[in-house]
Amino acid sequence: MKRRGQLALVLHAHLPYVRHPEHARFLEEHWLFEAIADCYLPLLEVFRAAAQRGSRTRLTLSLSPTLLSQLADTLLQSRFLDYLERRLSLCEGETSRRGGDMGRLARWYRQRLTRLRDLFLNEIGGDLIAAWVELRDCGLLELITTAATHGYLPLLRSQESAVRAQLRVGWDCFREMTGQPPSGLWLPECGYYPGLEEQISAAGYAYTILEAHGIQQGFPKPPWDVYAPVSCGSLALFGRDPFSAQEVWSRETGYPGHPVYREYHRDLGFEAEAGVLDGFLPPGVRAAPTGIKYYRVTGGDGPKALYDPQVAAGQAAQDASRFIENRRRLTARFPPGPRPSLIVAPYDAELFGHWWFEGPNFLAALIRALDQAPDLEMVTLGGYLERYGSVGRCIAAASSWGEQGYNQAWLRPETGWVHLQLHQAAAEFNALVACYGPGRGDPRELLRLRQAARSLLLAQGSDWTFHMGRGGGSEYARTRVVGQLSRFAFLADTLRRGRDPRERLVALEQLDNLFPTLDLAHFGASDVEKA
């Protein structure tokens, strides 16, 4: 039977820059450690198993530059191992304190974490990046990237130099850390505005992904809706399938809300008796997630039932079958022909394992089922584009995948001041590059200019404005923006005043050590802006 449809599963692995070498332990570094232990290592298990059995499935994985930089950092690698040992020690304590079903679940957590520690230490030598590159080289994964610090580009466009630097620094970082340039770009938050395609193409990317209405509201109307890529200038645009998104993301009807799945919010870190968490939490922190969760979603407002991993894994396999069957129904709407329809299903990678604990089980079952499916196959975006090309030209519409579909998630009363200051800082940096950039400044001035660029890029991350005013993470997000803008202002002032604060510069370089080969040519006003 001729294949009638193709599915492109795209996972976007990203975390903001949460490295804090100035503290022995820092709570927000747990964001990274939790993602590695609960998401990246379990996904790696799934992908390696598929590759070893010769799976014909192909997936697209986006790796953000800030994530890559932190995964390669030796300090954070050692701290992750310390985190694993602390978490394992907590599991050991739980196995001795708990009896019955809860005790069995504690032992299950201990065995699972021991297996993942062995994978990290002994099988991949602590190098997640090399493990992903190996899967790329064997053909299972197509690796792409995103903007340097995940800046939300529609709200940076008032200074086009900021957009250009985000795109090009990200491209450079990915190439240096994975050995190959990226062909595709994950737009941060799927944020797009008309004209952005020129910047994306000029930075070296061949394609990107838009939220559905960015394609559907384009002109002329795309003949295949979001089920085939379109061309916008020299850039190919893929549209997100809204039905695949709803099945997984919806709070009301999405798979992760099934009653047998693990409840995310009920964590030992918020319920343990006094003293239990003393060896696990950073100093001064009274409560925080531990990854040890004993209860399932259950449903309703009543008491929660105990979690059963085997039952939950069985449900994940059922949901994978249901997901495939729904994709079959969707592709059946398109007549057979030389071009198969393409369903693009992009998700945050952290959904699979961290937010939705059974997500890796779901993906494993999905891959196995699709390996046997005669009418639907999983492909990469680049592979589809190379084989079939686009279906025509389209001027895409402004869009994002945030709430209400535009800029609201990042532009709110709590965050308006951030965008004003980012605009002013980017304009000031343009002037600094013109005065002290390559060919103008001496080596010491160039070092300060590069560090100022790092501070500016870090302040632009979309994660900070997303979290502000939203409860958990809000105060930390504000602190990060204020801190990075303060570092930028300090370095800019030293350049203007002709000061050379060598010790302070060394300290800042140790704090924010990403993008070591940062190219200042990506910054400053372009010829168009100068005119």
Image (cartoon, helix red, strand yellow):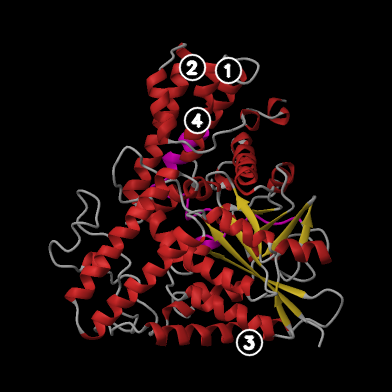
Which SS does the magenta portion mostly show?
loop
Residue position for label 3? 325
The CA span between labels 3 and 1 is: 60 Å
The CA span between labels 1 and 4 is: 16 Å
Residue 49: image quadrant is bottom right
Tell me if I can see residue 383 in this picture.
yes
The magenta stretch spans which residues? Answer: 395-423
Residue position for label 1? 436
Earlier-in-chain disc, 4 versus 2: 4
Please tell me whether mark 1 sits on a helix, a strand or a loop. helix
Residue position for label 4? 425
Which mark is on residue 342? none
Earlier-in-chain disc, 3 versus 4: 3
Outermost residue toward the front in this view: 122
Residue 76 position, x and y percent, is: 41, 47
The CA span between labels 4 and 2 is: 14 Å
The CA span between labels 2 and 1 is: 8 Å
Please tell me whether mark 2 sits on a helix, a strand or a loop. helix
Residue 452 position, x and y percent, is: 49, 28
Left or right placement of residue 229 versus residue 286 in this view:
right
Q: Are marks 2 and 1 in contact (CB under 8 Å)?
A: yes
Q: Residue at x 38, y 72 (%)?
A: 112
Earlier-in-chain disc, 1 versus 4: 4
Q: Are marks 4 and 2 in contact (CB under 8 Å)?
A: no
